[in-house]
């Protein structure tokens, strides 16, 4: 209250904090049709009386709130979607209740806060299935449109192609809680949970099985049966079965240490043609060239 020229003038107080406690429930308990827009985002539903109080307190827009579970000592941040809940109740997405360790009907303290605008955030998927998405950054950007803020340590849930993916918020800048409404934020991804362990096990197994020359060889033997002449005569000595020829087939082994943008050529591995040639020379030496007498089909004219 200020006094000016004998008049008492009332000015609204600004910057006052809204704080109230409600019974919290998941969105599935909200009366009426199913609200997927609430479940797939990071905003809550509050009662109409909260809007009246917030208006009188002249709270800064956009309205952001700190959600506190005093019993478990957990907290998070969220925006508000609507003020249509029953008096004394508020409704939260299920993943948010899971972060706060809340059960249906628990008491939740809601306090208005002002958060800095986000500049950087880092996420870690909880499943390697997230790698199957063609453009994960675009999918995450589209999903975050339903969020108002992010809190370091929270595990958010996004839905894509009828599948729910969980991502842990590893880091946010410039603070542990940031506003992501109308901001230019850089996003990074950490390797999914279990991804490094799986890849290292595969590498160790392959290194044990693959020889040092990084070449897998397979021996293919020719026909082992005996041949018979059509005229019934016995074969001559030079027509006996030739010794079995063994062919070497080389198979390429993937380079599991390959780095994108690097081409490596291993010149220590012999070409297939060189390996087969060594066996062919031995066969050629044992074979004798034709020693018979030749005849001309044309009769010589005398």
Image (cartoon, helix red, strand yellow):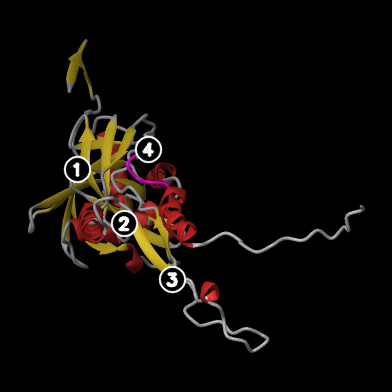
Give the quadrant of residue 179.
top left
Q: Position of residue 242 (x, y in %)?
A: 48, 71
The first of marks 2 and 1 along the sequence is: 2
Give residue 59's position: percent from left, percent from top: 27, 34
* Disc 2 from disc 1: Cα separation: 21 Å
**Circle 2 is placed at which residue position?**
128
Query: In 3D space, how far apart are the residues under numbered discs 2 and 3 (Cα atoms)?
Result: 50 Å
Image quarter for residue 72?
A: bottom left
Image height check: is 293 above or below 115? Answer: below
Mark number displayed over residue 244: 3
SS for dot 3 = loop
Please provide percent x and percent y for residue 17.
Answer: 18, 37
Task: Residue under label 1, please give it.
Answer: 152
Looking at the magenta stretch, what is its main secondary structure?
Answer: loop
User: Could you say which disc has been placed on residue 265 in the image?
Assistant: 4
Residue count near mark 3 (Cα–Cα under 10 Å), binned few <14, some 14–19, many ≥20: few
Q: In front: 134, or 296?
A: 296
Q: Which residue is located at x 36 percent, y 37 percent?
A: 264
**Residue 235 drawn above or below residue 188:** below
Return the residue found at the far bottom: 232
Q: Residue at x 21, y 54 (%)?
A: 200
The residue nearer to you, when weighing 107 against 176, is 176
Q: Residue furthest front?
A: 302
276 part of magenta stretch: no
Secondary structure of residue under mark 4? loop
């Amino acid at each position: 209250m200020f006094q000016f020229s004998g008049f008492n003038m009332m000015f609204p107080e600004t910057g006052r904090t809204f704080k109230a406690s409600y019974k919290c429930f998941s969105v599935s308990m909200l009366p009426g049709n199913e609200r997927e827009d609430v479940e797939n985002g990071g905003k809550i539903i509050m009662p109409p009386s909260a809007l009246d109080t917030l208006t009188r307190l002249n709270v800064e827009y956009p309205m952001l709130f700190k959600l506190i579970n005093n019993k478990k000592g957990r907290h998070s941040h969220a925006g508000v979607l609507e003020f249509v809940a029953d008096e004394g109740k508020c409704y939260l997405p299920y993943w948010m209740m899971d972060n706060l360790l809340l059960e249906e009907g628990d008491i939740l303290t809601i306090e208005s806060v002002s958060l800095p605008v986000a500049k950087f955030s880092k996420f870690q998927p909880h499943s390697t299935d997230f790698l199957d998405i063609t453009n994960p950054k675009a999918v995450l950007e589209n999903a975050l449109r339903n969020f108002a803020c992010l809190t370091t340590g929270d595990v958010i849930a996004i839905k894509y192609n009828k599948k729910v993916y969980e991502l842990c918020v590893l880091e946010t800048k410039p603070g542990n809680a940031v506003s992501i409404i109308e901001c230019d934020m850089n996003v990074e991804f950490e390797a999914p949970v279990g991804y490094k362990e799986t890849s290292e096990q595969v590498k160790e197994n392959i290194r044990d099985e693959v020889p040092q020359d990084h070449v897998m060889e397979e021996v293919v033997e020719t026909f082992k049966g005996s041949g018979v002449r059509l005229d019934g005569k016995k074969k001559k000595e030079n027509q006996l079965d030739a010794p079995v020829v063994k062919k070497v087939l080389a198979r390429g082994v993937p380079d599991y240490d390959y780095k994108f943008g690097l081409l490596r050529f291993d010149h220590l591995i012999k070409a297939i043609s060189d390996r087969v040639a060594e066996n062919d020379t031995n066969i050629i030496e044992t074979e004798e060239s034709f020693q018979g007498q030749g005849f001309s089909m044309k009769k010589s004219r005398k």
